Amino acid sequence: MLKTIIMVGMGSCLGGIVRYLASRFIQEHVMCSFPLGTWVVNILGCFAIGLFYGLFEQAHLMNSHLKLFLTVGFCGGFTTFSTFMNENFQLIRDGNFYYFALYTGLSLLIGFLMLMAGYSLVKLF
């Protein structure tokens, strides 16, 4: 268990650093109000987690520590959006369309409402 936690932690640390550097680089080189750096990182994270899962399935790689390092760790640190999209993919692939719609809708709606609630709470004090 300790080795698993260390692998996820190392991947997450690396993913977070890469996210920061990539997002900052993009925002500094493309001047616009749209959060392009974050958007690009989120989209690349979706591609990366799909690529990693595909590689593990295609090559029948069973190294669970490497899989956790790259998917839960790196992609999770790089962006949680990739994990969200992967979970949606799993729901669709398994034919759980109702839960796909519910999970997506509630995540977006409640997530945004909670962001507004947290922001509003700070403004009260």
Image: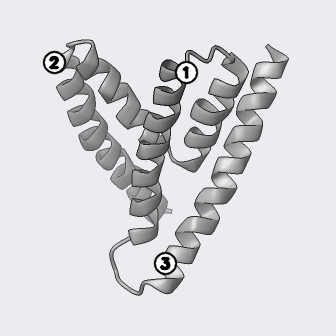
| Camera-side residue of 75 and 100 | 75
| Camera-side residue of 62 and 16 | 62
Looking at this rendering, what residue extends furthest in the front direction? 59
**Callout 1 crowding tier (Cα within 10 Å): few <14, some 14–19, many ≥20:** few
- Identify the residue under disc 1: 59
The tag earlier along the polypeptide, 1 or 2, is 1
Q: Residue at x 76, y 30 (%)?
A: 7
In the displayed structure, 123 sits above or below 3; it is below
The tag earlier along the polypeptide, 3 or 1, is 3
Give the amino acid type for the residue marked by disc 3 in the picture: Gln
Q: How many marks?
A: 3
Contact flag, marks 1 and 2 (Cβ < 8 Å): no
Q: Residue at x 52, y 29 (%)?
A: 55
Q: Which of marks 3 and 1 is in front?
A: 1
Q: How is the image coloured?
A: one colour
In the displayed structure, 72 sits above or below 27; it is above
Badge 2 element:
helix
- Identify the residue under disc 3: 27
Q: Nearer the viewer, mark 1 or mark 2?
A: 1
| Camera-side residue of 100 and 90 | 90
Give the amino acid type for the residue marked by disc 2 in the picture: Tyr
